Image: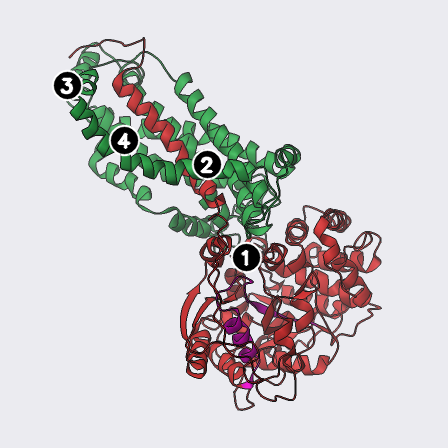
Chain colours: A red, B green
Amino acid sequence: MSMGSTGEGLGRRDLIKRSAALGLISVPTMSFLSACASGGEDGSTKGPDKGLVSKENPFGVAKGGKLDVVVFKGGFGDDYAKAWEAAFDKKWGTTSSHLGTQEIAAKLQPRFNGGNPPDVVDDSGAQQIKIDVLAKGGQLADLTAVLDAPSLDDPSKKVRDMLIAGTVEQGTQGGKFVALYYVYTVYGFWYSGKLFKEKGWTEPKTWDEFLAVCAKAKEAGIGGLAHQGKYPYYINVVIMDLIAKKGGLEAMKAIDNLAPNAFEGNPAALAAVEAVYEVVEKGYLMPGTNGLTHTESQTAWNQYKAAFIPSGSWLENEQLKQTPDDFDMKFLPVPTLADSKLPFEAIRAGAGEPFIVPEKAANKAGGQEFLRSMISREWSTLFAQQANSLTVVKDGVDPNVKLRPGTASAVAAVKTAGSNTFNYLYPDWYSEMDAEIQNASNELMAQRIQPKEWIKRAQAAVDKAAKDPNAKNNRRS
Amino acid sequence: MSQVARGKGRTGFITGFLILPLALYLTFVIWPYIQTFGYSFTNWSGQSPTFDFVGLENYSALMKDEVFRGALWHNLLLLVFVPTITILLALFFAFMVNAGGRSGAGGVRGVRGSAVYKIVYFFPQVLSLAILAVLFGAVYRSDTGGLLNGFLAKIGLVDPARPVEWLNQPNLVLWCLLLVVVWHGVGFYLVLFSAAMQSVPKDIYEAALLDGAGRAQTFLRVTLPLLWDSVQTSAVYLGIAAMDMFVLVSTMTSGQFGGGPDHHSEVMATVLMRNFLYFGKSGYACAMGVVMLVLTMILSVVTLRATRRERIEF
């Protein structure tokens, strides 16, 4: 045993240890840096499979070709897609390869960058590649030809005539139709028919009535409003719907079109934010709801811990396991403020699950044909059966399919609303602005900012988005 | 080493072994770095192979980016606290487990049941960060269904109608995350320091004991100096963990890739990922990656330099 010191120079052991330590630096940074590396620019030069173009085969799908399908395997599962692919293969003699995944961005980004993307993608979920980003990069095929192709159910009609209103508008980026949003969704509040019956509460139609029910709920020892606090996306649905209803479609378009007075100086916007803030101030929120995830808060609501929760019509499918059998889920359009321009019955309705065909797909014709097939009664019914949801195909579901109470009430609300539907486009057009408004809403619900500050921040987000050189490509009228 | 290098045949032999790992290293580590550096001067969107050269625009935008600056500040805070707290706790526990016991004259041993402690302390290390995030999600849950809130409500410290929203409090969120990292790390470093302590010859301790050294003195005068190499390496490791933090922040806090509420738990990696995958500003994100790399390199060198002191061999 000896005690000595090596003050000068680097010992061999030292050197190895140090270089090992330095090498370790690469571990955390590397994963991010290597994520930045693209696969190079080799545009694939292999010629696309082409068949003869005819009335039955408007895109010229080659018999016996290959079809590469990637779908988001989320709340709807991916069984529906497998059923579709089987039907497609049978008709066209193709061999489909199927990938159902939640990691859309991770799986597809290298393929988009490498120039060998799949032929059809359901680009959805938390890790979706934003459609606006893909469109700006010129990665999406123009699907206008699909819209103008004859529909499968009735060849005298075009595919576009089979779609419910708004589908084309929603899938349009920079003037081109690039994404087929397939699952029809309505947004609003949800409540338990059983709870309301038990307590003798009635469906509120105005915001005052809504607050009154919240007050009664508080007396009964439960929360009035639950929301998915960790994801302020949901409370934004309430705020934005109140703005659209109070200020009319003009107020909604002002936001989508990034108007300088979209929020600031817009009395409808301030009234809407103040209305939501009143719920917070009066203590009608379910305790702790501001920090809960969507499943946590929705499950608490399923356990009768709150009267209302905002969500889209996927809610019922998402909560299938947590919902008591006699819960009697009901949809409620967002109640109106005084002097609202739109009636109570008006609802936000839009479509989710964007299906795209990449511009560089090897079998682009096959991808387009796949989308055309989706707009058929056969495929739409397949979807409704496998995924328990409605599609954008007009009357696309066989009337014999029995619906669950929540979906049934949503369908009834859609019928009552008629043409009184509206839908925001800014979340698809301006991801950054959306994220900033969500942050502001989180602060509002936690009572860390006041409605006026919310308006200021939301307007700042709009003004920032307006400076984006790409903003002029998106416009709605 | 020089003797080895002199023989030509041996050189070829060694080169043969090194060429493949070197090639792999160049392809999968160095090349992405260089690419990233290149992309940081472009407006690449991340979803298309086309982009324009924009010079230093990304870097100048980065300087003005308040969110990124806040994230950098959070990383620095973590960099100070994560290694310090983890190492101090691990050293304390390791000492107690290995040399803290005091029974029998001249005996150098751990406190009673130290073998069990060693195993139990190591448990957190076995869990992956993803599981940890779920576990602590349940601890910090913002209603009374959460472990902390439920407990505090039971003993009357928290009003059930106003539970503490741990991860939704701007001034709490970062510390809540810090606790998770420390909880996760202490066990591993305890075992690491234990191993180092066990390699210290017992006669040193016995000599110290015979000279009448108390626990604190034994620790400060004997154990710590002999463990310095391990402590130094641990500091670098933990410093790197503090510069990362991506998994925990992105899963536990609100916001796209975490960072909420209102950017109060933002770290550089979360800002980077949001810009890279969500906002379609990948060139900008690459600039952040380069900044992260440079900062981490500097910090590692500084840590190794600053903690350099006389080495004791035994």
Residue A20, above or below A268: above
Q: Can residue A300 be seen from the camera position used here?
A: yes
Q: Nearer the viewer, residue B34 or A330?
A: B34
Q: Nearer the viewer, residue B108 or A3?
A: A3
Of the residues under marks 3 and 4, which one precedes in the sequence?
A: 3
Q: Which residue is mark 4?
A: B192
Q: Chain of mark 3?
A: B
- What amino acid does circle 2 point to? Tyr
- What amino acid does circle 4 point to? Leu
Mark 3 closeness class: few <14, some 14–19, many ≥20 residues within 10 Å: few
Q: Which residue is mark 3?
A: B105
- Residue at x-position 67% and y-position 67%: A170
Secondary element at image label 2: helix
Q: Which mark is residue B33?
A: 2
Secondary element at image label 1: loop
Of the residues under marks 4 and 2, which one precedes in the sequence?
A: 2
Mark 1 closeness class: few <14, some 14–19, many ≥20 residues within 10 Å: many
The mark closer to the camera, 4 or 2, is 2
The answer for how far apart the CA atoms under marks 1 and 3 are is 68 Å
Q: Chain of mark 1?
A: A
Quarter-of-image position of residue B107: top left
The answer for how far apart the CA atoms under marks 2 and 3 are is 58 Å
Secondary element at image label 3: loop
Mark 2 closeness class: few <14, some 14–19, many ≥20 residues within 10 Å: many
Discs 1, 4 touching: Cβ within 8 Å: no
Q: Chain of mark 2?
A: B
